[in-house]
Image (cartoon, coloured by chain):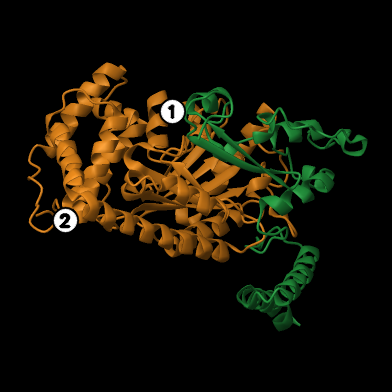
Chain colours: A orange, B green
Amino acid sequence: MFHDLFFSKSKGKAPKPCPIALSTRVRLARNLREFPFPGRAQSGQKKAVLSKCMKALEKVKNLKACTSVELDELSELDRQILVERHLISLELSQSDESGGVVLSDDRSCSVMVNEEDHLRIQVLSNGLDFQKVWALADSLDSGIESKLDYAFDSQLGFLTACPTNLGTGMRASVMMHLPGLVMSKNMDKVINAVNHLGIAVRGLFGEGSDASGSIFQISNQQTLGESETAILERLQVTLDNIVQQESMAREKLMEDDGLRLVDKISRAAGSLKNCFLIQSSEAMDHLSLIRLAADFGLLPEKFRAIADRMFIEVQPGHVQLSAGKPIEPGERDRLRAETLRKEFIRMPHLNLDTQVD
Amino acid sequence: MKCHHCDSQATVHLTQIINGQMHKMDLCESCAQEKGVTNPDNLSIGSLLDDQPSKPDASTASMTCESCGTTHQDFKKGGRLGCEACYHVFRPVLEPLLDGMHAGINHLGKIPSRSVEKKSVVENEEMLRQALHKAVEEENYEKAAELRDRLKKLQAPSSTSA
């Protein structure tokens, strides 16, 4: 089964702890010169694009160790798991024909075929590291470009189905954990301020601003009129600013009403240790507080990494993955609670020596 | 903040530039779902703004891309173009939109080595020179320095071969 790929633990490198930024992603939108974009293409043309792209991708050096699949071959559950891991988009997972994806075995790169554009090249990494992620995306793109003719215009850059992606075709985003700004009710202000700078804020899966788990995806909105490096630099400045605001909000929360915050965290810990039925959004909110506790030094460092891992494992697709089969929502809540209890049963009491009188 | 369609709390906030004007809309989760705004990345706010008067323009209304069949109406409704040729056909209606949508209207990013013809490289040099001139006029020296470096890089291979 395809999702067996995810049973194997990723080898060696542990994620670099970065308290506020969870992960960095760069995606490039590209189209082939001689075919209509997927939204306008006939069935036969989409098939031709898929086979042409898959053949070309096989020969790309950076994609030597990878798995290629056509969406038709994947079950609903496999697709859902890939979406939850941000390896394919929701749009591609719902594609009815000729969608494809190539995933590197270390899961850092994915290339989607016949999404909104013919190719969506994506590179993911833990923590905040635009330089590394852009360098990899750039070289992957160059590798693909040496095999395929891209639709490109000297004035408008890479041509994309939606004009909002024109130019560089690049969307760079960082997943950020911002519980301080959410709890102090400052998130709306931050969203408004960064929107004016051409930067978008979305929830974990793009579904709304006040995301469960206080996790937000922050990305550039503008793709034309600046170089990739200039876009990334501008985004970096904004992100540094948000990190600063978040740190200040956290400090203030602890200063103003530390007892209430500790109470909240402690109750979240209690819920995770004692739940028997739990939905993913509630689990996400508790995990967010555990992560925050680790940042404050109230819990050992390792609980940040555990919370990060559990953010994904409590998603509906991943609960079913651990069950090995599709299961109903009620049963999922039971199984999710069981997983969380096992994970957190040995979690120590909060270390309150330094934080609260 | 309240939803544009009902009185619930708005959690989805959309911003789009249409004809150079900024339009904002706030929606609650369920209205957003109903309107198909599940993924803001693929959003066409145009269809949501049904109260926006659209000026009929005979010269653009009949525009159709012969290569893929996309009409001006399709583009207005879905916000997407159908193929490479669309960008030539719809350029007159597209350019005013791009101005408000992006940081500029000229590509300053990566240039694919394979599909670049001599002609477009020349155009790009010219374009960079213009952008450099503009940046200096605006006293945006940081940008000017970047453009100058890019221009140098672009000129380098041709000067060595000559």
Left or right side of A147 for A70:
left
Q: Which residue is mark 2?
A: A297
The picture places residue A334, in percent across and down from the top left corner, at 20, 22
Does residue A195 lie above or below A266 as drawn?
Answer: below
Of badges 2 and 1, the one in the foreground is: 2
Instruction: Name the amino acid type tagged 2.
Output: Gly
The residue at 27%/28% (across/down) is A319
The numbered mark, 2 or 1, whose residue comes first in the sequence reads: 1
Q: Which mark is residue B93?
A: none
The picture places residue A171, in percent across and down from the top left corner, at 54, 51
Q: Which residue is mark 1?
A: A74
The picture places residue A210, in percent across and down from the top left corner, at 41, 38
Left or right side of A333 for B161:
right
Residue A242 seen in the figure? yes
Give the secondary structure at mark 2: loop
**Occupied quadrant, residue A128:** bottom left
Q: Are marks 2 and 1 in contact (CB under 8 Å)?
A: no
Does residue B113 lie above or below A148 as drawn?
Answer: below
Give the secondary structure at mark 1: loop
**Occupied quadrant, residue A230:** bottom right
